[in-house]
Every structure is written in C-alpha cells, then in structure tokens.
Image (tube, rainbow, N blue to C red):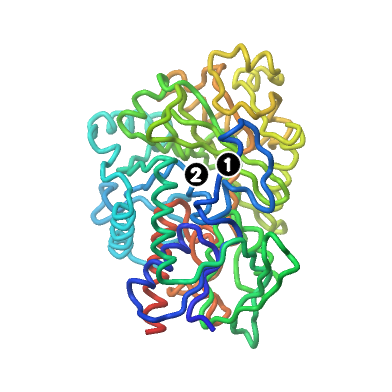
Amino acid sequence: MYDVIIIGAGPSGIMTAYELIQKTKNKKILLIEHGKSIKNRVCPLALNGKCIHCKPYCNITSGFSGAGAFSDGKLNSYHLSNTGKKDEIYLGGNDGGYFRKYYDISVIKDIISYTDEVYVKFGADPTLEGVKFQKEVSKLQKKSYKNGLELVSFPIRHIGTEKTHELFAKLEDYLLEYIDIKFNTTVEDLIIENNECKGVKIFNSLKPKDKEEIYGKNIVLAVGRVGANFLSDLCDKHNIASSCGSVDIGIRYELPDKVMEKINKYLYEGKFIGRVGIFGDKVRTFCQNPSGFVSNEVYDENIILANGHSYKEKKSNNTNLAILASHHFTSPFDKPLEYGRNIAKNLNELGGGKLVVQRFGDLINGHRSYEKDIKNNSVVPTLKDASAGDISFGLSYRTVTDIIAMIKKVDKVVPGFANPDNLMYGPEIKFYSNVITLNKDFETNIKNLYSIGDGAGLTTGLIMASSSGVQMGRILANKIN
C-alpha cells in the first residue's frame, strides 16, 4: 500500500515526487514509467541517421523525463515577464494551458519561480536568453502588430538537448534515494471501487504477461501528451468527467539561421500568434530551435511526428520551428485525438513510414517535391530520414491554407520567412487529451484520483507541466502528513 502512486515520469510526475520528498517524511511513494531509465535511453536515429521504431516504446517520447529528455530544454520564465498590465503574465491559449483557471497569477508566479530554481539547482544554465534587447524586441512587436500578429517574448533558460539529458539523470538519481520507481512498467487500468480509486493494474512493458495489482491511497495521472489516447480511454471506461479538447496540427519549418538572425539574437525564441487566412483560425509558431536539428518522434501505433532539438555545443546552420493551427471541434464530433492520428497515419503512409519533407515553393506552386529537389535545395535538411513528397495530400485544405497564410504574414516581419527553398516537414501534431474536469486540488470526480500536466489538458510545455507537479506535490503532502 503506497501513500501516493504517480503514473508517468515526465516533468509533472517527476516534480510531484520531488516536492513530496521535500514536504513529507517516511511516506511510501511509487513512480511508474512505461519506458526506460534515462541512462538507458538512446535514440538510434541520432547514431545511424535512421529511425528503427524502437519497441515497445520510442526512446524519444518514453522513459524517465518523457519527451523532455531529448527536447531542447527551454524553460520559459513566465514569472519574469510582464505584459504591461499590473501583476500579469502571459498564460493565454496554449502557452499556459488551464493553470490560470485554478490559481491567481501571483500564486502561479511563485510556483514557477520555485520550479525554475529547482532546475537551476540540478544543472540548468543560470543565464537567461531574450532579456538584453528590449528596444529591438519592442520594434519587432510593433511591426508584428501592424501585420496582424502578436509576437510574444519571454526570458528563456535554454538548457540544451544534451544538457537536459544530464540534468534529468541527476533528478532520477535523487528520486531513487527516497522513492520507488518502476521502469518498463505499463499501467493497463485503474482499480476503482464505489467511485474511489484504490490502485492500478500494471504489466511489464517487455513481458506483457507479467501482470500485477498495486494499491495506493492517492493516484496521480501524469501521463503527458504521449498518454493522451490512454487517458481518453480511461475517461470513457470509468466515467471520469472531461470535456472535448483540441488538437494542434501543422508542420516543422526549417530555414537558414541568417533569415532568423534578429529573432534568434533578440528573443532566442519568438512566438508569433495570429488569426490568419479565410478561416480565421489561431495559428502559432512554437518551439523555435536556433542552429538546431529537425527530429522524429514515434508515438503508439508507430505514428511518426516531427519535432526539433537544439544543442548547447552541436550546431547546424538552420533554425527550425513548428507552425501549428489550432482546431476545435463542435457537436456532434468529439474525437479530436482520432482526427489528428488519422492525419498522421495518412502522411506517414505517403512518406513510406517516414516524415514527408517538401519545399515551401513546391507547395505554393501545386506540386510535390522530389528527392532531387531536396538534394539541390539551398536549405540543406538537418533530418536526412524523411521522404520528399507533398504534405497537402495528408493535411486538410483548411490546415494547409492556415499554414501558408501564417508563413506569408511572418514574412512581412521576418523577410525571407517565405523563401521557396525553406523546408516543411509533416506532420507535427500536438495531442492534448480531453480536458479533465478538476477541482482546485486537481482531483477528478473519482475520489483520490488526480490528473496534472499536459495529459490532463491542464498545461502545455516543460515549465508549466513541472509547476503543476510541484503544486500537486504540495497538495498531497498537506493531505497525507
């Protein structure tokens, strides 16, 4: 019998465990992760340039620290950024999730500040990016506004992909001194009796026939975006209250550093947000990686999505970033996850089991890209394991229209952003689970069952997911002490 069982060793789950250790003594805590220890996570793509679809789970998306282990490790310091309004920070839309719904800005600032300090303690670079050139940033923001875009700027702590791995390895070692961690362990189901969660049903990820039941007084779902489908299934099976979520669909865009020179220098990561095109959908740039590398992520059912990394030491000549259109669905359709998954499957099939890469100019001119086009292109792709093709065969007309409109708008602020040689990798999709209905303690309508992080639709992004974990740890510490 455990005092707390945490499902998922991503940032929110890790920080829940960390804060419980700080606030409690002699309590039994279990952290369950279906992937490996971070020390055993190696991506074959980085070694041999080819994705081999690791089994049973992708080493990029699964394992201790989740996708964070191989991310570029950007900590958006929301607590240090003001929008001009008194005691206000930007937590709107998909940057803050729904955290703001439950707590006042002043409380959120304190939680984020504490979380940021924990990361610095374990090795995050104390240097902040995007703070030195406020006048230049202000000029770019005004230019963006005139062109119908919002350019959001935050102080950013860039850890770097390789340094992120080292940081989370230290956190793993720390947690192992105080709590139990089960790696290579998949949660098959929850044990719920009389509307109260009593434990979990698990099996060995490498030996699925090895099954077990473990009981706990408090169960925390911290499954991340990779667990969005799993969490939606749990909601349906156990009548966990939730509302229909959304899905962000788009591409990973790669262009020369020299085009993004000012954005990279002044902001490090600039987030352009706007309602563009004939549909007026919200489209945003996200996860900008100066001198970075485009990468694969493999989800369940071998779905391959695009992402980007940025290292502290290893550098390319290109910047990559996501361009994502937010799609919200209304009655009678209530399956945004399935919608996104079907788009990903179609594009993966068009790419022969790989991402599809296309020149922006080819998309505009209405024809596919061929291998010779990519080979002779002025922008050299940093991801070699992608198939030249036509993303418009897989993405909807609405999504393609949104992306083209956004690229053309950003080009008015950043000349060269719409250069025909710039590369588009598809698909990049951000899966958000159904938004779980929670009270202020992050508890669901099932007693003693909690849900946090990106998987719950509560947050998006590394620092916000981590902060929700810190708060979850404090809530549970008060309950079990």
Q: Is residue 389 above or below residue 23?
A: above
Q: Amino acid at mark 2?
A: Phe
Where residue 126 sits: x, y (%)? 26, 45
| Point 40% across, 38% down: residue | 150
Image quadrant in which the N terminus is located: bottom right
Give the foreground label among 2 and 1: 1
Dot label at residue 43: 1
Q: Residues within 10 Å of mark 1 (few under 14, many from 20)?
A: many
Q: Can you say whether 412 is above or below 279 in the image?
A: above
56 in relation to 380, above or below: below
Look at the image and tell me in which quarter the C terminus lies: bottom left
Say left or right for 298 vs 411.
right
Of the pair 473 and 274, the residue shown nearer to us: 473
Instruction: Decide which of 289, 195 is in the foreground and name it.
Output: 289
Q: Is residue 197 visible?
A: no
Q: Could you give the CA–CA distance between mark 2 and mark 1, rounded to whole angstroms? A: 9 Å
Q: Is residue 229 left or right of residue 291?
A: right
Question: Which residue is pictured at 57% across the width and 34% down the height?
Answer: 47
Q: Total number of numbered labels? A: 2
**Three-letter amino acid code at disc 1?**
Cys
- Secondary element at image label 1: loop
Query: In x, y percent, where is residue 63?
Result: 55, 55
Specify few, some or many for label 2: CA neighbours under 10 Å numbering under 14, 14-19, or 20 or more.
many
Q: Which mark is residue 70?
A: 2
Query: In the rendering, at what x and y percent does residue 196 appear?
Result: 59, 84
Comes first in the chain, label 2 or label 1: 1
Secondary structure type for disc 2: helix
Q: Residue at x 62, y 75 (%)?
A: 200
Q: Circles 2 and 1: CB distance less than 8 Å? A: yes
Task: Pick whichever, 196 or 409, lies toward us.
Answer: 196
The residue lying at 40 percent from left, 58 percent from top is 171
User: Could you say which quadrant of the image residue 356 lies in?
Assistant: top right
